[in-house]
Each structure stands twice: as structure tokens, then as C-alpha cells.
Amino acid sequence: MERDFSAPRPNVRWCGDITYLPVGKDWMYLATVIDIHARRVVGWSMADHMRSDLVVDALEAAVATRGGSVDGVVFHSDRGTQYTSAAFASACRKHGIRRSMGRVGSSYDNALAESFFASIKRELLYGERWLSNTDARMAVFTWLAWHNNRRRHSALGHISPVEFERRSINSGSLNLAA
């Protein structure tokens, strides 16, 4: 992808990553799939582990969100073991998704996903520590729904990801993201 975080329409380029969230005295891990066109989170998964099925579940959720047909989508990630696993490669092949990976140790190569996680931690997590996995899941689910449907993005002309996507599909040409 060469740090090109734009896409002319939905389901051209996706990116994903994993972050950790404090829950009680432990951690939960959040894997996301973001459609780069509208910065919309189209898939996510949370678990108390970082095994490859965490990212496979997020990918499967994204495919389901998009109606099951995503042949040709490019999925960009870092080179974490979850994304280089045979299980993730198999899930991508099954759906016709082409994989793209950044260089080792370069967070700039997946800057859109990194920026998203900075936002969720700043806007949702700041000063919070959930006591249970259920509390964490509910808070994250609520925030993701707000992010997709209500949060305004400067890169999208100060409209939400869902609204940007709706307008771009209807007009066939809207693409402010860079």
C-alpha cells in the first residue's frame, strides 16, 4: 500500500490491527478491520488472548458486514504473528482478500489503524478501567457504534463514516480522505 490510506470506494482497501485494553487486573485484546474509504470499522473482535482466531473473527465479521462478497479487497496489516499465521492467510484466501503488510517495526506503515487506536484510547479509555470483560465489551461496542454513525471526521469533510460511505455510494464520486 506504500502508506496510501485512501480508497476510491468501499471494499477496495481495508486495514487492521490489535490493541490491548485494561480489564480488572488483566487485559482484553481488540482486533479491528477498518474500511479505509470511509474510516468505518466493518469488523471487530475482542478476546482475552491474542491468538490468530482473534483477527480471523474480526475479518469474518467484516465480510459478514459487507454481505459476504469481498473478492479483491486488499487487507493491510503489520507483520504480527496473528496476521502472518496460516489461519489468517486461509481466511483471506477463502474470501478472495489480498494481503498487504508493512515493514517490520514501522508503525507508519499502518498509521490509519494506529491512529484509530489512539482515538479509542483517548476518547473511551481515558481514566477508565473496566472490572469485567462484559463491561469492556459493552463499552467498546457502544463506542464503535458511535464512531461509525455519529463521530465526525475531518478527513471525511466532518461527517461520520457511515454518512460518508452512504453519500459516496449515492454520488459515485465522493472521496475526500487522504
Image: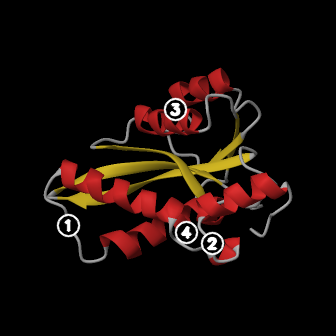
- The answer to the question of whether label 3 and label 1 lie on touching residues, with beta carbons closer than 8 A, is no
Residue pictured at 59% horizontal, 67% vertical? 160
Of mark 4 and mark 1, the one earlier in the sequence is 4
- Tell which tag, 4 or 2, sits nearer the viewer: 2
- Tell which tag, 2 or 1, sits nearer the viewer: 2
Note whether residue 7 is visible: no
Left or right placement of residue 126 versus residue 149 in this view: left
116 or 163: nearer the viewer: 163
Residue at the disc numbered 1:
129
- What is the spatial separation of the Cα atoms under label 4 and label 3, in whole angstroms? 23 Å
Residue at the disc numbered 2:
159
Q: Which mark, by number, is residue 93?
A: none
Of mark 4 and mark 3, the one earlier in the sequence is 3
Residue at the disc numbered 3:
60
Residue pictured at 39% horizontal, 62% vertical? 143
Q: Residues within 10 Å of mark 4 (few under 14, many from 20)?
A: few
Q: Position of residue 59 (x, y in %)?
A: 53, 37
Give SS at disc 2: loop
- What is the spatial separation of the Cα atoms under label 4 and label 1, in whole angstroms? 21 Å
Query: At label 4, which amino acid type do we have?
Result: Ser
Of mark 2 and mark 1, the one earlier in the sequence is 1
Q: Residues within 10 Å of mark 3 (few under 14, many from 20)?
A: many
Query: At label 2, which amino acid type do we have?
Result: Ile
Residue pictured at 77% horizontal, 58% vertical? 168
Of mark 3 and mark 2, the one earlier in the sequence is 3
Q: Which mark, by number, is residue 115?
A: 4
Q: Position of residue 152 (x, y in %)?
A: 57, 74
Give the vertical position of 89 relative to 147 (above or below): above
Query: At label 3, which amino acid type do we have?
Result: Glu
Query: At label 1, which amino acid type do we have?
Result: Arg
Q: Residues within 10 Å of mark 2 (few under 14, many from 20)?
A: some
Q: Position of residue 13 (x, y in %)?
A: 72, 48
